[in-house]
Amino acid sequence: MKKPHLIALWVSALWLFAACSSAVADELTPQEFVADPQRETVVLLDVRSAQEWQAGHVKAAHHVPVGEIASRATELLPNRDAEIVTYCRSGGRAGAAAQQLRKLGYRNVRAIQGGGYEQLAEQGLHTQTGP
């Protein structure tokens, strides 16, 4: 009688493990991004608010707040095979934006682990304030 419950528990655990593993595979650390010799060809998206963008952002980034991804992606990102990396402050919005882009058909999207702006700046990427 307990075997069906154990099987359900194992199936749930395997599903959770698979879900967590796939999420991790779609992230990269700020150090990995900075060390990537191909990073100049990556479309870097800052998905933070306008106020956060104005306070400071990576110079090479494009600003698309996470709430505008669905409405602006096709206009700003016509190549669905382009390598896209999202960043925010703490990781939640970068992950959500990456997930939205994947649902829209973008095939090569990753998020900076833990958000990234401060960490990218600390790694030496050029930053600026204002527009």
Image: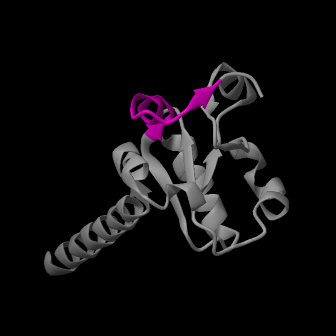
Against 83, residue 81 (above or below) is: below
Q: Position of residue 53 (x, y in %)?
A: 68, 29
Which residue is more in the foreground, 56 or 26?
Answer: 56
| Quadrant including the C terminus | top right
Against 57, residue 31 (above or below) is: below
Against 115, residue 9 (above or below) is: below
Q: Specify start and end residues of the magenta stretch as a single range.
A: 115-128
- For the question of whether residue 16 can be seen, the reply is yes
Quarter-of-image position of residue 72: bottom right
Residue at x 78% of width, y 69% of height: 78
- For the question of whether residue 42 can be seen, the reply is no
Residue at x 25% of width, y 67% of height: 13
Q: Is residue 125 left or right of residue 76?
A: left
Q: Position of residue 77 (x, y in %)?
A: 75, 62
Residue at x 58% of width, y 51% of height: 96
| Quadrant including the N terminus | bottom left
Q: Is residue 4 left or right of residue 129?
A: left
Q: Is residue 16 left or right of residue 51?
A: left
Render colour scheme: one colour
Residue at x 59% of width, y 74% of height: 107
Q: Position of residue 62 (x, y in %)?
A: 70, 45
Q: Position of residue 99 (x, y in %)?
A: 58, 60
Quarter-of-image position of residue 61: top right
Residue with the most extreme left position: 2
Answer whether residue 119 is magenta in the image: yes
Q: How many marks?
A: 0
Answer whether residue 50 is magenta in the image: no
